[in-house]
Image: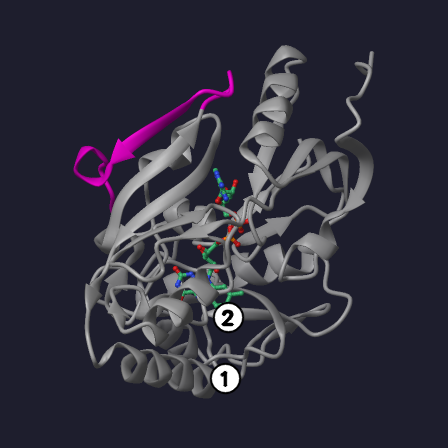
Amino acid sequence: MTPPLPPLIQTKKKLSDLSTFGIGGPAEYFAEVSSEQEMADVLVFAKKNQLRHMVLGKGSNCLFDDQGYSGLIILNKITFLEGLDSGQVKAGSGYSFSLLGSQTARKGLSGLEFASGIPGSVGGAVVMNAGANGKETCEALKSVDFMNMEGMITTFQRDKLSYGYRSSPFQKMKGAVTAAEFTLIKSLKARQKQIEIIDYRKKTQPLKEKSAGCVFRNPDNGHSGALIEQCGLKGKKIGGAMVSEQHANFIVNTGGATASDALKLIRLIQEQVRLQTGRQLKMEVRYIPYE
Ligand SMILES: Cc1cc2nc3c(=O)[nH]c(=O)nc-3n(C[C@H](O)[C@H](O)[C@H](O)COP(=O)(O)OP(=O)(O)OC[C@H]3O[C@@H](n4cnc5c(N)ncnc54)[C@H](O)[C@@H]3O)c2cc1C
């Protein structure tokens, strides 16, 4: 039986509107939270009612199912920012990671230039250990505030966290990242570097199209995009999902793509790359099944 719903929790929210891919059916339950208190209320409710749930940032690394999500999607909008005039910057986990990259660089602070152009939230970047241009989120990270399912926040220092390529301990923890603090260093070159990074991104990535960024993790000593291109798959299309002509590791939604189209294309790419090059491509984008 459905529990009585607190005012924060709505029903039936289109996930295609909450993902940069523009794909996904409705979430059974949905809550948008803009403070730690609201996050705590919703997590405690989910735990008490044993409700399957997922914290969502900007939905830029997610492929939702066509049927939607059976459970509660918690859209994180905790967006404060402190310390921009010092080398210690603390951001709410819903803050734009890209904006943080450009704002810090404009202030002559170096360490997050690579974030400029990554369309995720600070929380999503901390959880995914987002990276670009040879840099990763964990490098500038000082500490992370993490809220458990009882609504209690623990501050984890970076040196106690084991990070890897696109992986973090938070991927296996129940709860939510609520804030992250970064240690940045003064540099006269920060702004110039950030401008070069964003210019390069604009030239090499299909930023005007709907996508979830790079679909596959890079294998050891290789680039997924180069392998996919080598297999002649640029422009390959299934339904509305297409391998980008600009960057072969991107699948773009050319209009009306379904999760089923994207998944079929993903399987086809994996099979062709395995047959033609012997390499196994693993997904970086997170497919979220209906149940
Ligand atoms: C055009 C484009 C370019 C991109 N370029 C890059 C790139 O250069 N490098 C790169 O690494 N990625 C890139 N990405 C992928 C994506 O932007 C990153 O993975 C980003 O860090 C995801 O952040 P998000 O807020 O959108 O996370 P979501 O997609 O909302 O969530 C991703 C995962 O993190 C979890 N999560 C999110 N927020 C929280 C939180 N507060 N607490 C707990 N769990 C949370 C979710 O449950 C989910 O499992 C790109 C994507 C696009 C569309």
What amino acid type is highlighted by mark number 2?
Answer: Phe
Q: Residue furthest front?
A: 85
Query: Is ligand 1 closer than 8 angstroms to the Cβ of mark 1?
Result: no
Instruction: Write down the residue under mark 2.
Output: 250
Query: Is ligand 1 closer than 8 angstroms to the Cβ of mark 2?
Result: yes
Residue at figure coordinates x 60%, y 52% from the top left: 63
Q: Residues within 10 Å of mark 2 (few under 14, many from 20)?
A: many
Q: Please say if 180 is above or below 230.
A: above
Give the residues in magenta: 148-164
| CB-based contact (under 8 Å), mark 2 and mark 1 | yes
- Disc 1, SS: loop
Q: Residues within 10 Å of mark 1 (few under 14, many from 20)?
A: some
Residue at figure coordinates x 62%, y 30% from the top left: 38
Question: Magenta stretch: residue 254 in it?
Answer: no
In the shown orientation, is residue 205 left or right of residue 52? left
Tell me where residue 112 sits by quadrant.
bottom left
Instruction: Write down the residue under mark 1.
Output: 246
